[in-house]
């Protein structure tokens, strides 16, 4: 615990990088790796990598149906991970935590299981222009299958949700409001408690895509006011292949299963089956056992630093980077400029240089960023750009990374003769 | 500093050859790069007698690599028959581009080729197999 207390006093990128083996990797530039793509996926601390190895080495058997000691041990660790997740997001009960592969699967589960039994052809589903395709396409599919109408809340020129437009959509009494907490493409932090409050007051079931917020800031589902919350393990230092759907117990109880087969049944005859209790009703087949323990280790690591500390660190980096990049000629920044409304994700465009070319030249400088539409093509259209370059921060980044980014942008402009 | 963004690549990017849309055209097709959403369209006009390419034009928006690749390829197309267009080897397209292309920029470099194949065949085609086209080069390539 001494080590943890030390950390909670000083969250600094350089000090934490020692916990992440990837930063020992040499880059072709000859300089240390500057990883600015955590919004796509986070790097893994040694504690998470070791938890996976420990589970496979010493605690591995299938869960749920073993009589023997090893299976009981595996089961205890898997269900222990569920309790860790529940405590981390302030859920009333671990029963409200469904393990899935990722946020995408969590949203698909809600769209199929809740959506197809609650949404009909005269109904309205509302989502927003700010969504990742994961919180858009499943609703398009739901509406295509049921004949329901899909509407989109507009965003403002500086990448914020248009709350007046949200209110006018809510007046039409939608069945479902699906909204992201933080935009993956622009970094916008939506006023989520206000949004969920408006949605529920209008009678909508509110689904929050929290893939970009749970890893980076404190989130308490009891205070959030949503009905469903989806997030991925791999963006919060955990393994890929494990994600979480939180849902209100009464809703989960009433929903039919999504996938069917083993584990999710109580009793099966040749002609039918009775479903298991939640959350196991939604976990058909052998789940991601080791990955769940890895996710629990990631949560331990984050709690050792404190989510307030993580958020404060990224806020500080955002302020520094926004001002550093914003003062460079030929750089256009997207999204809100208020640090309280903008997470550690900066999407930018360089005049006359395609984002793909930017990312290639940045890579040669040892700076890893993402270029493209960030699975948010409608949002790119909205801002009149085919794509952007996106730099995203996490707890292992620091001010030196911002300088490396700025230097690499200058190098890019030099190659293209725009500087 | 750079062996990818050579001057001639940047020149093709700034002033691409055979730019625009032919109207009317005998063949046309448009496609996009799934990783970045870049879109490219091609229109082709054929000689009425021989059926060979009279004129070709590319139109769209994209990165330096995709634009330069289509521009360079467009210089070689006049006079080719449809069979010859169909038989273009993607490796030749990369060779003509003249800069090292790795897996990261594979689709950028072959977007023009793919759109042209779509026009010739009148249907969406699959991306060429990366390992086949890049061979050993895929171990190194443009994104070290």
Image (cartoon, coloured by chain):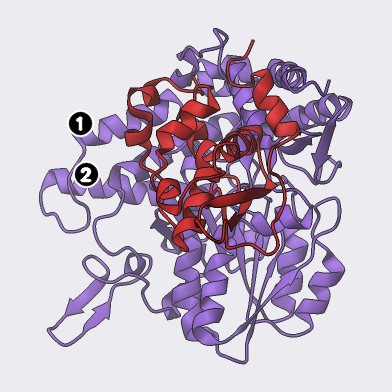
Chain colours: A purple, B red
Provide the residue designation for mark 1: A57
Residue A250 percent across, percent down from the top left: 49, 76
Residue A415 percent across, percent down from the top left: 72, 19
The subunit carrying tag 2 is A
Name the residue furthest front.
B49
Q: Is residue B124 left or right of residue A165?
A: left
Q: Nearer the viewer, residue B11 or A233?
A: B11
Q: How many marks?
A: 2
Indicate the secondary structure of the residue bearing disc 1. helix
User: Residue at coordinates 55% horizontally, 51% vertically from top-left?
Assistant: B53
Q: Nearer the viewer, residue B44 or A65?
A: B44
Indicate the secondary structure of the residue bearing disc 2. helix
User: Residue at coordinates 60% horizontally, 45% vertically from top-left?
Assistant: B36
User: Residue at coordinates 42% horizontally, 55% vertically from top-left?
Assistant: B125
Residue A390 visible to an observer of this rendering: no
- The tag earlier along the polypeptide, 1 or 2, is 1
Q: Nearer the viewer, mark 1 or mark 2?
A: 1
Q: Which quarter shows the C terminus of chain A?
A: top right
Provide the residue designation for mark 2: A73
């Amino acid at each position: 615990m001494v080590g943890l207390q030390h950390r909670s006093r000083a969250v600094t990128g350089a000090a934490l990088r020692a916990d992440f083996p990837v930063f020992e990797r040499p880059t072709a530039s000859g300089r240390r790796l500057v990883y600015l793509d955590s919004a796509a996926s986070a790097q893994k601390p040694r504690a998470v990598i070791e938890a996976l190895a420990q589970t496979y080495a010493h605690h591995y058997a299938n869960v749920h149906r073993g009589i023997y000691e090893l299976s009981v041990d595996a089961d205890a660790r898997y269900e222990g991970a569920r309790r860790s997740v529940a405590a981390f997001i302030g859920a009333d009960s671990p029963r409200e935590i469904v393990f899935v592969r990722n946020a995408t699967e969590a949203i698909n589960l809600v769209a199929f299981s809740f959506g197809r039994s609650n949404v009909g052809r005269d109904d309205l589903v509302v989502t927003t222009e700010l969504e990742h395709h994961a919180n858009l396409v499943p609703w398009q599919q739901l509406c295509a299958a049921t004949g329901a109408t899909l509407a989109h809340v507009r965003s403002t020129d500086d990448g914020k949700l248009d709350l007046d437009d949200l209110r006018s959509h809510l007046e039409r009494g939608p069945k479902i409001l699906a909204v992201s907490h933080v935009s993956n493409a622009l970094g916008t932090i939506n006023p989520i408690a206000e949004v969920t409050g408006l949605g529920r007051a209008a009678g909508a079931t509110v689904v929050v895509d929290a893939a970009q917020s749970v890893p980076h800031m404190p989130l308490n589902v009891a205070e959030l006011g949503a009905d469903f919350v989806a997030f991925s393990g791999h963006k919060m230092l955990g393994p890929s292949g494990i994600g979480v759907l939180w849902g209100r117990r009464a809703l989960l109880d009433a929903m039919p299963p999504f996938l069917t087969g083993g584990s999710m049944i109580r009793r099966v005859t040749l002609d039918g089956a009775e479903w298991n209790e939640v959350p196991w009703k939604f976990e058909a087949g052998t789940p991601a056992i080791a990955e769940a323990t890895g996710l629990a280790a990631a949560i331990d690591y984050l709690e050792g630093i404190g989510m307030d500390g993580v958020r404060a660190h990224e806020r500080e980096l955002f302020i520094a980077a926004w001002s550093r990049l914003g003062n460079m000629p030929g750089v256009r920044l997207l999204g809100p400029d208020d640090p309280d409304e903008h997470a550690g994700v900066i999407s930018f465009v360089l005049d006359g240089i395609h984002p793909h070319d930017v990312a290639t030249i940045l890579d040669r400088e040892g700076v890893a960023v993402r270029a493209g539409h960030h699975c948010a093509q409608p949002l790119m259209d909205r801002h009149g750009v085919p794509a952007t370059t996106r730099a995203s921060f996490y707890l292992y980044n620091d001010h030196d990374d911002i300088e490396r980014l700025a230097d690499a942008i200058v190098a890019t402009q030099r190659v293209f003769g725009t500087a | 500093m750079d062996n990818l963004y050579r001057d001639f690549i940047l020149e093709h990017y700034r002033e691409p050859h055979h730019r625009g849309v032919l109207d009317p055209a005998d063949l046309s097709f448009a496609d996009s790069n799934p990783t970045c959403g870049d879109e490219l369209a091609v229109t082709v006009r054929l000689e009425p007698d021989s059926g060979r390419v009279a004129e070709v034009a590319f139109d769209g928006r994209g990165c330096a690599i995709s634009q330069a690749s289509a521009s360079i390829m467009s210089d070689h197309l006049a006079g080719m028959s449809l069979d010859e267009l169909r038989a273009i080897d993607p490796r030749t397209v990369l060779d003509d581009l003249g800069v090292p292309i790795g897996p990261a920029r594979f689709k950028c470099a072959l977007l023009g080729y793919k759109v042209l194949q779509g026009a010739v065949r009148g249907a969406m085609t699959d991306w060429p197999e990366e390992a086949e086209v890049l061979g050993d080069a895929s171990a190194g390539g443009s994104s070290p």
